[in-house]
Image: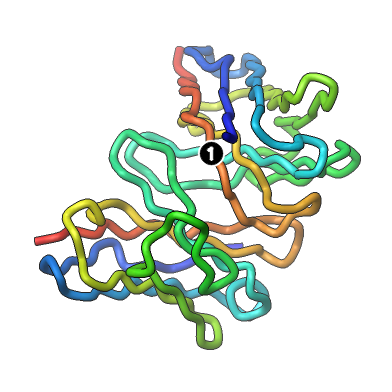
Amino acid sequence: QSALTQPPSASGSPGQSVTISCTGISSDVGGQDHVTWYQQHPGKAPKLVIYEVSKRPSGVPDRFSGSKSGNAASLTVSGLQTEDEADYYCSSYGGTNNVIFGGGTRLTVL
Amino acid sequence: QVQLVESGGGVVQPGRSLRLSCAASGFTFTRYGMHWVRQAPGKGLEWVAFIQNHGNLEYFADSVKGRFAISRDNSKNTVFLQMNSLRAEDTAMYYCVTENSAIIIGRFDWWGPGTLVTVSS
C-alpha cells in the first residue's frame, strides 16, 4: 500500500490561511474516518493536531481544522503564526491492520 | 501526565540485532495498544509495528515483517521492539507511541522523544 500523497511544501504570511492536502485511496482515506494530522518541529517528536478527520485534541488551537472529501483529506491552518512553521504529516488507518503516513509537508510562514 | 521513554538505541552492524524498550507512565497502560513509528534522517514518518493492549495481537509493516517482533510487559508498563537482521535502511529515530484504543485505528496521541538506531559497518 503506497504512502498518502502530500505536497512537499506550503507557505503563507502571518495571519493568512493555508491548506495542506492529503490524498489516498478508497481503502484508506476514503474508506473510514481514522484520518489524523501531526505537527513536527525540527528535532522534536510529532504532535497530534487533528484526529478523526476534523476533531482537535485538547490544547490545540481552533486555528487548526480538518476536513475530508472522497479520498482526499485537508488540514487548514488559519491566522498563521510564526510558531506554526513546521512539518505536517497526515496518516490514515490503512484498512488491513496497518497505518499509512503521507510524505510530509513543510509549512513556511513567510 | 503521559510519559514515554525509549531506550536501547545505538550503532549496530548490518545483520545484527537490537532490542528497544519503552517505559510508559501516566495512563492505564493495559487499556491501550502501542505502536513503534520510525523516521529515517531527513525523511518522513513510517509506521513499524502495533501490539494490542493485552499483547494478543501484533501487526507489522511489510518492510519489517519477519525481522522485527513487538511485545509488552503489562506488569512493568513496558513495550519492546526486537529488531533482527538489521539493514542500513533500518537506520532511523524510533518512536514509541500510544494508540487511542485497544485495537489498531492509527490515532497516535502521545509520542516518546525517540531513540536513534544507526545500522552501519
Label 1 crowd (10 A; few <14 / some 14-19 / many >=20): many
Q: Residue A96, relative to residue B65: is it above or below?
A: below
Q: Measured from the top left, where is residue B121 in percent x and y?
A: 45, 12
- Label 1 element class: strand
Determine if residue A79 is in view.
yes
Query: Residue at (28%, 39%) from the top-left corner?
Result: A42
Q: Position of residue A23 (x, y in %)?
A: 47, 75
Outermost residue on the bottom side: it is: A70
Q: Is residue A3 visible?
A: no
Please name the amino acid that badge 1 sits on.
Answer: Trp
Q: Quadrant of the N terminus of chain B?
A: top right
**Residue B84: % across, % down:** 68, 22
A96 lies left or right of A43: right
Q: Is residue B81 above or below residue B38?
A: above
Colouring mode (rainbow / by chain / secondary structure / one colour):
rainbow
Residue at 29% across / 62% down in the picture?
Answer: A8
Examine the rendered structure and indicate whether residue A38 appears above or below residue A36. above
Q: Nearer the viewer, residue A58 or B48?
A: A58
Vertical comparison of A102 with B115: above or below: below
Task: Please identify the quarter of the rendering in which residue B83 is found.
Answer: top right
Q: Residue at x 71, y 31 (%)?
A: B68
Q: Disc 1: which chain?
A: B
Q: What residue is drawn where x is 49% and y is 65%?
A: A56
Judging depth in this view, the residue of A72 and A80 nearest the camera is: A80
How many numbered marks appear?
1
Q: Which residue is mark 1?
A: B111
